[in-house]
Amino acid sequence: MRYRWHTGSIAWLIHRITGVLLTLYIFLHLYVLSHLKDLDSYRKMLQLMESPLVKLSELGLLALVLAHGLNGIRVTLLELGIPSRKQKTLFWYAVATGILLFVIGGIPLI
């Protein structure tokens, strides 16, 4: 028997993966903040923030937040009574909105 991936299954998987990655990010963020105790370490961190790798990771964080947030809105709408047959349409609206917001939000980050 072969499993067929449906839109709901893919949305579920995206939501879980982005949730785990955002949780890991929060721990990393708190770790970095806890090590900024003096002016010298703060200046070093500001220099690091200008590197292209950090800029790229900020774009990744934006993508994670958008994917998780918009998928959460989709799940909430389904829980509030929107018929589940609309799940595929809601998913593609969330994808289109996410791409649009990613482009708009990514331009200042670059």
Image (tube, rainbow, N blue to C red):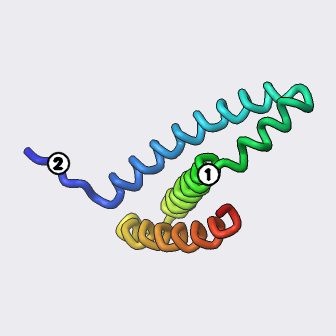
Would residue 79 be visible to someone looking at this image? no
What is the x, y in percent for residue 41? 83, 30
Q: Is residue 38 in sight in this rendering?
A: yes
The answer to which of 39 and 36 lies nearer the viewer is: 39
Q: Position of residue 101 (x, y in %)?
A: 60, 70
Task: Name the image quarter holding the N terminus.
Answer: top left
Residue shown at the point (91%, 27%) measured from the top left: 38
> At numbered mark 1, what does the secondary structure look like: helix, strand or loop?
helix
Q: Quadrant of the C terminus?
A: bottom right
Residue 86, quarter of picture: bottom left
Residue at which label 1 appears = 52
Q: Position of residue 61 (x, y in %)?
A: 60, 50
Task: Indicate the amino acid at tag 2.
Answer: Tyr
Residue 17 coordinates in the image, percent (x, y):
45, 43
Residue found 51% across the figure and 58% down from its top: 71
Give the camera-side residue of 101 and 54: 54
Q: Which residue is mark 2?
A: 3
Provide the secondary structure element on which disc 2 rests.
Answer: loop
> As drawn, is 10 to the left or to the right of 40?
left
Q: Residue at x 63, y 72 (%)?
A: 104
- The residue type indicated by label 1 comes to Pro
